[in-house]
Image (spheres, rainbow, N blue to C red):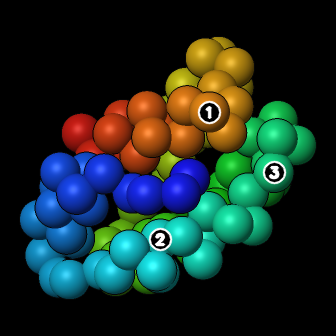
Amino acid sequence: MDKFPKDLLGAVNKKAGKSISENSIKKIASGVTPSTLQSEAQIRQLIKQVSTMANVPVSDDTVKEIVNAVKKSGMNLNSLESLVKMMIKK
């Protein structure tokens, strides 16, 4: 992810209620590998990292929904933006 779309960054900041830098998001994204999105434990860890960074609590039910959606969709790193958009809608 070379350039995080500004409209998506704005939506993340609006949802979080605070300013999250593009570099903070890139730092987390840089640790995501194709295998990350195949492992439920790693998906849960990624959700926790994003939740902590945004200071937005995520309920267990929402975590389960996100994990199931990621696993069902077969998302890969090329569709990481789609994952972020899906999470913003929650």
Quarter containing the C terminus: top left
Q: Position of residue 59 (x, y in %)?
A: 41, 57
Question: What's under tag 1, amino acid-wise?
Answer: Asn
- Using residue 85 as the reference point, say whether residue 25 is left or right of it: right
- Which image quadrant is residue 19 in? bottom left
Would residue 29 be seen by someone viewing this image from the given angle?
yes
Q: Amino acid at mark 2?
A: Ile
Question: Is 21 rendered above or below residue 63?
Answer: below
The residue under the point 88% across, 43% down is 35
The residue tagged with tag 2: helix, strand or loop?
helix
Q: Earlier in the sequence, mark 3 or mark 2?
A: 2
Residue, disc 3: 33
Sequence-wise, which precedes: disc 3 or disc 1? Answer: 3
Q: Which residue is mark 2?
A: 25
Residue drawn at the location 34% of the way across and 81% of the way down: 21
Q: Residues within 10 Å of mark 3 (few under 14, many from 20)?
A: few
Q: How far from the left and from the top, in percent, is residue 82? A: 43, 32
* Callout 2 touching callout 1 (CB < 8 Å): no
- Label 1 Cα neighbours within 10 Å, binned few <14 / some 14-19 / many ≥20: few
Instruction: Tell me if residue 90 comes above or below residue 22 in the rendering.
Output: above
Q: Is residue 79 above or below residue 90?
A: above
For badge 3, the amino acid type reads Thr
Q: Secondary structure at mark 3?
A: loop
The residue singled out by tag 1 in the image is 78
